[in-house]
Image: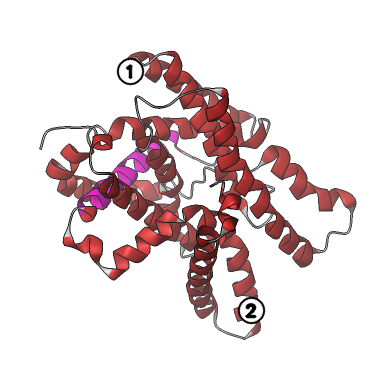
Amino acid sequence: MEVSDISTQNQTFRLDYIDICKGFGIILMILGHIPVAKTPMILIYSFHMPLFFILSGLLVKSENNPFTFISIKRKFQKFLIPYAVFFVPAYILWFIELKPKTLNHALKPLVAAIWDNTNNMPIAGALWFLPSLLWCSLLFAAIHQKNKKPYVITIQVMAFVMFGFFMEIHYKGVLPWAFGISSIGLLFYFYGYLLKHYLQFLSDKYSGPLLLLCCLTVPLILTNGLVSMRTGTFHNIFLFIFGAFLFGTTVIVFAYKLSNSFLNQTLVIKLVKQIGEGSIVYLCLNEVFINVYKAIFNKLGLSSQLVLFFAFVATIISLFVCERIFMKTKLKIVLGKK
């Protein structure tokens, strides 16, 4: 099959592989928040959040990416309504757990939610991603609408990316709502926008070599240590970008192949797709449930390994139920949906 734009292919097929990737990414995120052992943590954090930026870029349509008042309003509703709503239970749980003694301590998470959005967010630290993706989508829409020539878009994107790395390395937390991280995320967002034109080709010709390269690259990625987009911790920037591109691309390519095989209809893949479909609920509430269940299972006197295992299982089940409630009722407006 020739290199083609996957956005022209069957809509259900396209969404299947996207949901598989999102579901896989969410599971990795929850494992990272549990957390798991150091080595898998390094591998998970090397690409799991860049993966979501890449997937968002994959969904951008070349002919329909307006930068108008209406489109901006819709983006704000889509990202900031769940951001504000899901911050509330996280803050309440934080308040109950820590019982802040001073007004400054009590207000610190609120200030973080309004400005910093990264290091000082209580419990639901993953909420940083929503404003970050908002900035990222607005930046790309503005760049894309102004000039659709690839080389011009590339120059403008790279200018923002270099600005983002500079700010996160030298002036961390100065910009509001993780704008510096958003500028870095723009690199992966733009990469996803480009990748959609070559995904079928990579799936047909290079899935094996990509997987082999991932396996050979693991020791190199491990040398870079634990990175985090949320805190702006990258260590070797080039290793971080390389690992995120390589592992992210490989996951997407294999999800693409999987969605076009008989395995797409198996129970496990259907469950992963279900998680991916409701990823915003999992993103916003996972740390709340993790903290509650870890506290419960610790009080039962279980070993640390069993606490983490049962907390993971209970969190997945609880989030699955929550996601169904939100999606099947009028509460879906909380998710920025009509």
Confirm whether the magenta stretch covers residue 124: no
State the mark number for residue 63: none
The residue at the far left in this view is: 1
Q: Position of residue 279 (x, y in %)?
A: 47, 54
Residue 148 left/right relative to 203: right
Q: Position of residue 76 (x, y in %)?
A: 59, 36
Q: Which residue is mark 1?
A: 150
Which of 229/238 is in front?
A: 229
Which of 210/336 is in front?
A: 336
Q: Are marks 2 and 1 in contact (CB under 8 Å)?
A: no
User: What is the crowding at mark 2: few (fewer than 14 residues within 10 Å), some, or many (at least 20)?
Assistant: some
Residue at 84% over, 59% down: 100
User: What segment is highlighted magenta in the picture?
Assistant: 236-257
How much space separates mark 2 and mark 1, taking CA atoms?
53 Å
Q: What secondary structure prevails in the magenta region?
A: helix
- Above or below residue 288? Residue 203 is above
Residue 76 left/right relative to 320: right
